[in-house]
């Protein structure tokens, strides 16, 4: 393939230009790779207590115009049924590994689309009404939900094509500030190389005269249930 | 930049004049920059450790630049290990060729694309069009620009110069929608429906990227609308193009940049969506991933020790929103995909020194320093501006005759460039100025300077050096 040779030439070209720019010898392959100490004297952990972190998460998620509710675990199945009814959800997508108890109340009134054993097609996802997932983490400071394609979350397309995302966050999954979340994700990225999606409110645009409009391409509605 | 397709462009001074006369444009831009400016200040204030984050961001980027060859190799190895393929493009034409041939290999003639200034820089869409490939822009603003056959005017909100009724008329005509109001929600809905069809059938997606992590090979796209997620998730093949300066060393560094970027950019605590992918994942998203690493003049920037910091830029656009010059002229006057203060320093370094339009950009500033103050990675834009003015002058002197060599503006710029480099020199110059200016100050301003310097005051009043500068006052106080 002709491109193959062109490409590797350019690799040499670029690397040589970089070395020259940095004042290194062209054939110096032994440059030591030292990474300068970066002072990380910014905040590493939230100084709020658990109760405050929980409240902050709930508040900040709602500020993005997502609906947030705090409930106890026993009420969850009933709540999900009620949301589906209120929002007219007839076809609900659920990811592999979702806790079975969450959908207990739904049989009969909502048809459940499972992404296993065969994955749902893009068209099926697009024609569905909602997706119900758990999450990997919540970040209080920014009101962010973090998905890492783990159990109960599914592959990325599931939380993208349906127009309504119902997300369950357990109290103990909520961390205070961003650095805490990034550190918890190290393993996801390093060991399993799974994709990470961060969601802060529903899809939005401010492209028209800077007016915020919910929902251009991602789900237009986000409903977050916090289990306390 | 792509030399072949770039016609000779007017200088900033010339085009700024015509944009200043366009009141509609000025009103739109003014409204937008003011709104974001206020919001940004609010969310930045919320973080008590903002300065520490800026400092860390600046150092991490400096670390990357000083070891760029090593980090590039590390990134390549990580992406390959995670199942991706890495391509190297020395210039825009080569990047366009690589991307075109990858799309052709798939037998596709239509691709979906998420906003990327890098692809604008290399004019990828034009290159694809010549090869019979349509690249559909999927950002609302980019779609507006594409349908209007227009050029983006702001890094973050490229259609900032269009108001709602202009957009409604455009959609009515180009998307064949008869009934459409000018409500932003209705306009967004029209775009959603139009683009959704295309997302579902697209086989190839093209994206830029905000960051690439050398250590893990992870690429990040930070966005609001969800079209970034669509383009990087739904197609079978994903091609992402990133400038070689977009590297960050470690995954952990996101804890710095993901705090700096959204607050500086959209002035939110966090933007709606961030997507991070590491090569390919079985059963989830594109099963083929290509990363194109682009130089296109960046190594020239790297070679200039003062200019090098320009490569730290994370394209947040905060410097545009605080710039008094940008606010009045808008983005188009810069004749570059990179407008505003960052454009004024990046464009001339990427382009040839003979490009007059680019060489006029370092003068598109009052050196007020607001850009430096807001820059989340602490790029000293005024310092680089003055440095580049010195370079422009040197180049003109080399290529011009004796008149150029003795031009007082040129000599003045050299003194300034030198003085900006150290505080001592700067303060000494201030003291000299305070004595020298006595002759010209009238009612607290200098509106006429003698001789050659009168060119400067012919179009602007000067503030004299105050009797006591802020720094002097501060020192005395503490
Ligand atoms: S120069 Fe700084 S403020 Fe301007 S866009 Fe780049 S990172 Fe943002």
Image (tube, rainbow, N blue to C red):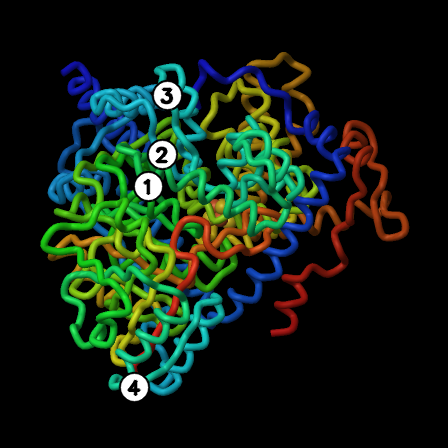
Instruction: Say above or below: A157 vs B255.
Output: above
Residue B191, given in percent of the width and then of the height, sits at 49, 42
Q: Image point 64% across, 44% down: which residue?
A: B164
* Pointer 1 residue: B231
Check if mark 2 and mark 1 are on a common chain: yes
Check if mark 4 and mark 1 are on a common chain: no
Identify the element where label 2 is drawn: strand
C-alpha separation, residue under disc 2 versus residue under disc 1: 6 Å
Count of marks placed on residues: 4
Identify the element where label 1 is drawn: helix
Residue B294, image quadrant? top left
- Of the residues under marks 3 and 1, which one precedes in the sequence? 3
Q: Image point 40% across, 63% down: which residue?
A: A200
Q: Is residue B395 left or right of residue B49?
A: right
* Pointer 3 residue: B128
* Pointer 2 residue: B112
- Number of residues whose C-alpha sits closer than 10 Å to that of mark 1, classed few (under 14), some (14–19) or many (20 or more): many
* Pointer 4 residue: A72
For the residues labelled 2 and 1, say whether their Cβ atoms are less than 8 Å apart.
Answer: yes
């Amino acid at each position: 393939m002709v491109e193959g040779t062109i490409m590797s030439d350019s690799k040499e070209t670029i690397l040589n230009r970089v070395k020259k720019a940095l004042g290194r010898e062209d054939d110096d392959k032994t440059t030591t790779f030292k990474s300068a100490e970066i002072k990380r004297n910014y905040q590493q952990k939230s100084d709020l207590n658990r109760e405050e972190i929980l409240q902050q998460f709930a508040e900040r998620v709602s500020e993005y115009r997502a609906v947030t509710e705090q409930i106890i675990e026993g009420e969850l199945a009933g709540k999900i049924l009620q949301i589906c009814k209120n929002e007219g959800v007839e076809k609900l997508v659920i990811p592999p590994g979702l806790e079975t108890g969450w959908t207990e109340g739904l049989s009969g009134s909502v048809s459940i689309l499972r992404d296993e054993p065969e994955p749902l097609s893009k068209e099926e996802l697009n024609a569905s009404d909602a997706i119900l997932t758990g999450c990997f983490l919540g970040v209080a400071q920014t009101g962010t939900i973090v998905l890492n394609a783990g159990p109960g979350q599914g592959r990325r397309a599931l939380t993208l094509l349906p127009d309504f995302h119902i997300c369950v966050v357990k109290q103990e999954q909520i961390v205070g500030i961003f650095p805490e979340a990034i550190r918890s994700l190290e393993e996801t990225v390093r060991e399993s190389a799974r994709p990470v999606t961060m969601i802060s409110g529903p899809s939005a645009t401010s492209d028209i005269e800077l007016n915020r409009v919910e929902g251009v391409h991602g789900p237009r509605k986000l409903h977050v249930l916090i289990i306390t | 930049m792509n030399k072949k397709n770039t016609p000779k462009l007017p200088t900033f001074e010339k085009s700024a004049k015509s944009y200043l006369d366009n009141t509609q444009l000025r009103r739109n831009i003014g409204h937008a920059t003011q709104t974001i400016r206020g919001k940004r200040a609010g969310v930045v204030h919320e973080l008590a450790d903002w300065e520490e984050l800026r400092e860390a961001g600046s150092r991490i980027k400096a670390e990357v630049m000083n070891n760029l060859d090593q980090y590039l190799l590390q990134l390549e190895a990580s992406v390959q290990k995670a199942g991706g393929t890495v391509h190297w493009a020395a210039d825009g034409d080569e990047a366009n060729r690589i991307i075109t041939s990858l799309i052709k290999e798939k037998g596709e003639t239509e691709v979906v694309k998420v906003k990327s200034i890098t692809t604008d820089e290399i004019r990828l869409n034009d290159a694809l069009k010549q090869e019979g490939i349509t690249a559909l822009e999927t950002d609302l603003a980019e779609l507006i620009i594409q349908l209007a056959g227009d050029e983006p005017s702001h890094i973050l909100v490229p259609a900032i110069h269009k108001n709602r009724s202009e957009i409604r008329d455009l959609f009515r005509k180009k998307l064949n929608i008869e009934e459409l109001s000018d409500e932003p929600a209705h306009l967004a809905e029209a775009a959603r429906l139009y683009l959704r069809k295309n997302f579902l059938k697209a086989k190839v997606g093209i994206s830029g990227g905000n960051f690439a992590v050398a250590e893990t090979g992870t690429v990040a796209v930070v966005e609001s609308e969800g079209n970034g997620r669509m383009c990087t998730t739904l197609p079978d093949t994903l091609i992402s193009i990133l400038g070689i300066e977009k590297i960050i060393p470690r995954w952990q560094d996101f804890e710095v940049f993901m705090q700096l970027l959204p607050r500086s950019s959209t002035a939110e605590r966090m933007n709606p969506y961030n997507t991070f992918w590491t090569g390919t994942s079985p059963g989830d998203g594109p099963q083929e991933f290509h990363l194109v690493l682009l130089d296109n003049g960046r190594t020239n920037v790297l070679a200039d020790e003062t200019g090098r910091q320009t490569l730290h830029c994370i394209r947040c656009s905060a410097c545009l929103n605080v710039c008094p010059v940008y606010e009045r002229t808008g983005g188009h006057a810069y004749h570059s995909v990179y407008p505003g203060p960052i454009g004024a320093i990046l464009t001339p370094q990427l382009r040839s020194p003979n490009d007059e339009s680019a060489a006029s950009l370092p003068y598109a500033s009052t050196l007020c320093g607001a850009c430096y103050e807001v820059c989340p990675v602490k790029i000293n834009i005024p310092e680089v501006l003055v440095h580049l003015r010195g370079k422009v002058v040197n180049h003109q002197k080399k290529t011009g005759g004796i008149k150029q060599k003795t031009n007082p503006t040129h000599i003045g710029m050299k003194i300034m460039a030198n003085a900006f480099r150290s505080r001592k020199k700067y303060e000494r110059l201030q003291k000299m100025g305070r004595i020298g200016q006595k002759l010209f100050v009238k009612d607290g301003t200098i509106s006429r300077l003698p001789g050659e310097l009168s060119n400067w005051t012919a179009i602007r009043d000067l503030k004299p050096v105050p009797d006591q500068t802020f720094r002097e006052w501060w020192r005395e106080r503490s």
